[in-house]
Image: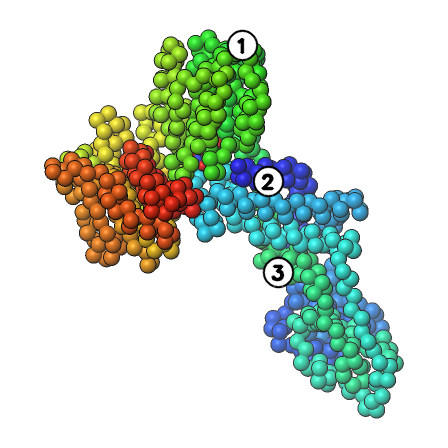
Amino acid sequence: MTLSIWRYSHLALAIVSSAFLLIASVTGIILAFDPIANSIESYAIDDIEEVTLAKTIHVLQERYDELITLEIDEHDAIIATVVTKEGNSETIYVDPLTGKKLGVPVEKSDIIKFATNLHRSLFLKGIGRFFVGFVSFLLLLLSITGTLLILKRQGNVKRFFSKIRKKYFTQYSHIILGRLLLIPIFIIAITGVYLSLEKFSLLPAKVISHTIHTNHSSATRRVLPKDFELFKTIFLTDMRSVEFPFSDAPEDYFIVKLSNRELIIDQYTGTIISEEYYPLITLASYWSLALHTGKGSAVWSVVLLISCCSILFFIYSGFSMTIRRIKKSSISNFNHNKDEAEYIILVGSETGSTFAFATIFANALSALGKTVFISELNNYCRYKRAKHLIIFTATYGQGEPPTNAKRFEKNVKAIQPINQLQFSVVGFGSLAYPDFCKYALDLDTLLKMNPKFESILEPCKINNQSFTTFKEWAMGWSSQMGLDLYITPPEKEKVDKVTFSVIDRSDINEDDTFLLHLKPHNNMDYESGDLLAFYPKEDNVRRLYSIGKVNGNIMLSIKKHEFGICSTFFSQLEKGDKIKAVIQQNTTFHFPANKKDVIFIANGTGIAPFLGMITSYPLGDSRVHLFWGGRNTSSVLLYNEYIKKAQETKHLSTVKIIYSQELGNKMYVQDQIEKEASFIASVLKNGGVIMICGSIAMQKEVIKVLEKITATYLSEPLQTFKQQKQIKIDCY
Ligand SMILES: Cc1cc2nc3c(=O)[nH]c(=O)nc-3n(C[C@H](O)[C@H](O)[C@H](O)COP(=O)(O)O)c2cc1C
């Protein structure tokens, strides 16, 4: 739910600011070229950091009649206002070593003037400046909400820069560019806000006031500026400007502005009359302007240029993602009026995929001539002719509803249905989360409490949008209703697949299980516990396999099923064959960092991610304990090599292999866990983590035992440890 709050805030900010941001970015792009062009044709000379103010004043005074001002521009070129020997007053670029005239400052081009005005005030003077300042503030908020969205998506701060799962180009590039340009855009925004506040005099004053005592300059012998000890210690790179005394009168001084302070200097002796350091606000103004405009650094100007271009891209990609999301969750036009329909389908969805399933189901009902109305859960109301209610909903957060379902509970308590409604709830979720499909289950319980709702099927839980489970539920539902529904597979999902080469495949053992080793063709970032998604061409329905990362490559443990499309295909692969698949991050099932004890519980092929973890992880001080359940003593042979090696290298502290089919010693993993209840409890008590991978049946039994253990030994429900992320589950 928090995800959607940030997403909606991000979107709302983008909508409000996009037109202004468009103008600001385009003009920003034009303006970014100015410092780049200036630095190319700059009059700066090399080694300026070695030239003293005394030296430059000396050469200039020799060459010109009078010096009025001296300043250094953002490209380290020296500009002097002088009176020439011919009596002309000129402002010129000079060589600080020889005093020679190098050129004259040129006026900004019309296009730069135009862009500057538009960028600063939209040609609307004060009100325009206000808008520009406000848009800078919105850009600041956009960069903050964008950062939060990335953090939410990546799971935690440490994974901020980890690989992003590529769904489609605009989404992928929006996130990648967002991460890269976050800091420059943040700087553009915050300095923009600062400069606007300054323009409206909303910042503290930054004027320096000098205290000058008038009894100075009683010196009898005049020291020439070239001999001022002070000027010999000031290098041009530290200088910002020098104003020369207006006349020979002792009350006229040198005013020297340095990078951090301002000095008033006696023109006769060269001594400091007054010295004032700039207040923080002056430095902040200086740096805001420099950072916002790129003046003084061609490299930073290029960064600003790229950032402005990327803001334009963000506007495009952000809106394109929103339109795509709206389309995905939009309701088809087969919809009947809510009061005409016999079948009401209500959907709770955050990113739209649940709508796709609801639409397939609604289409199938429509094809049978049924009147269907489909809407969001939040829109629940009275339906005149409705007899059936089917709810499809995802779960978010810790068993929370998606945003478009938040009001359902309140509404359903307040609005009694007109007719008796037969209902069924289908939950969409992921076993990677401890509260698998919890919101759907809560809704089912809620409706069951109301006699106006009649449950006709137990709630169905669908993991990772499995079409197979969905179809099974739909078949069960239709036979219950006496209907002959035809469920069509979803349209082929467009995913960017990567090529993998088979580097090894083991023989199939007595349990029909084998190991498959794959090497990705591209450099990819994945960890043990991530998932390999494979889409067989026969049905294009995604199958997920838990990855063990072994020697930098992927190791899968696969059980060949008699009619399994995928497992059969994989079992026939030979070394050198190529397949296309997608790696899905599964951050909630990565090896936990800095834990004293980690317990792995697995059965069958569920051991694969754990083999990866014990083989290639730097486990630090963690002690790892493996409980694995197989059929008989030959089942473990497939994994022996990895287990033995991990024991030798002390990556595994304890290994408990349990056999369910071994004569005279039949046991299941949960039985062994129960036997070692006090050890399991002590690990949980000391903050250790339990990771479970394997079949759902095993998971259920293990969870039951763990619930018993935590209640008996720790007087806490297992839920407490789930919430503390001490229980990680990836079962299928
Ligand atoms: C941030 C986030 C939190 C999630 N939390 C849960 C959860 O607590 N329980 C669960 O079963 N699934 C959870 N899921 C998985 C989604 O419910 C699942 O992917 C669902 O199919 C998404 O449906 P939608 O595309 O219609 O929103 C979560 C997914 C995300 C991205």
Name the outermost residue toward the bottom. Answer: 220
Measured as percent of width and height from the top left, residue 706 is found at: 32, 41
Amino acid identity at mark 3: Ser
Q: Circle 2 is placed at which residue position?
A: 10
**Count of number-bearing discs:** 3
**Cα separation between marks 3 and 2:** 32 Å
217, above or below 538, in the image: below
Residue at position x 48%, y 42% in the image: 153
Measured as percent of width and height from the top left, residue 70 is found at: 75, 71
Left or right: residue 601 versus residue 121 is left
Q: Is mark 1 within 8 Å of ligand 1?
A: no
Q: Circle 3 is placed at which residue position?
A: 297
116, above or below 383, in the image: below
In the image, 328 versus 340, the foreground residue is 340
Residue at position x 67%, y 58% in the image: 288
Residue at position x 23%, y 57% in the image: 649
- Label 2 SS: helix
Numbered circle sitting on residue 718: none
> Earlier along the polypeptide chain: callout 1 or callout 3?
3
Measured as percent of width and height from the top left, residue 43 is found at: 66, 65
Q: Is residue 357 visible?
A: no
Amino acid identity at mark 2: His
Quarter of the C terminus within the rendering: top left
Measured as percent of width and height from the top left, residue 219 is found at: 83, 89
Name the outermost residue toward the top. Answer: 369
In the image, 597 versus 275, the foreground residue is 597
Q: Circle 1 is placed at which residue position?
A: 385
Tell me if mark 2 has few (under 14), some (14-19) or many (20+) residues whose alpha carbon lies within 10 angstroms of its own.
many
Tell me if mark 3 has few (under 14), some (14-19) or many (20+) residues whose alpha carbon lies within 10 angstroms of its own.
some
